[in-house]
Image (spheres, rainbow, N blue to C red):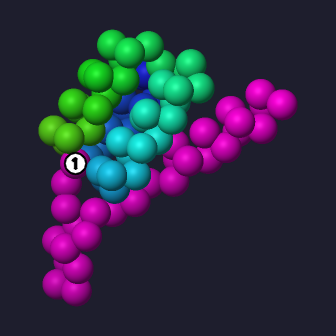
Amino acid sequence: MRNFIEEILNTGNYNLAQMEERIQKMYVLGKLSEDDMTYLLNLAAENACLDRRADSNAFVGVDALERLLADELLNSF
């Protein structure tokens, strides 16, 4: 799980607040250790980049982790 999230974080193409929330959810679900969570939260903060289009200065979202989390939740039932 850590490697998958790390690959997304290395792109820098995600919404920081959403990614932090998803990393914390994966920790709560027992998918990440506390050390992994801390590492990934720090990496997320370091690698986040802004979408600097003329009409926006917002973060670009990535849905891959959201889909993974949904799959994990569905598989746990």
Quarter occupied by residue 60? bottom left
Number of other residues with Cα within 10 Å of mark 1, as a class: few under 14, some 14 to 19, many 20 or more: many
Residue 26 falls left or right of residue 54: right
Identify the secondary structure beneath mark 1: loop
Instruction: Identify the residue at image location x=60%, y=39%.
Output: 69
Instruction: Identify the residue at image location x=33%, y=13%.
Output: 35
Instruction: Identify the residue at image location x=55%, y=21%.
Output: 31
For the stretch drawn in magenta, the main secondary structure is loop
Compared with 74, 2 (above or below) is above
Report if residue 66 is visible in the image. yes
Residue 30 falls left or right of residue 51: right
Nearer to us in this view, 69 or 30: 30
Where is residue 5 drawn, in percent x and y?
42, 32
State how many labels appear: 1
Which residue occupies the extreme right position in the image?
77
Compared with 50, 33 (above or below) is above
Q: Please, what is the three-letter code of the amino acid marked with disc 1?
A: Ala
Report if residue 14 is visible in the image. no
**Residue, disc 1:** 48
Asked if the magenta segment contains residue 58, the reply would be yes
Where is residue 72 drawn, in percent x and y?
68, 33
Q: Quadrant of the C terminus?
A: top right
Bounds of the magenta segment: 48-77
Asked if the magenta segment contains residue 47, the reply would be no
Instruction: Identify the residue at image location x=25%, y=70%.
Output: 58
Where is residue 19 drawn, in percent x and y?
38, 45
Residue 10 falls left or right of residue 29: left
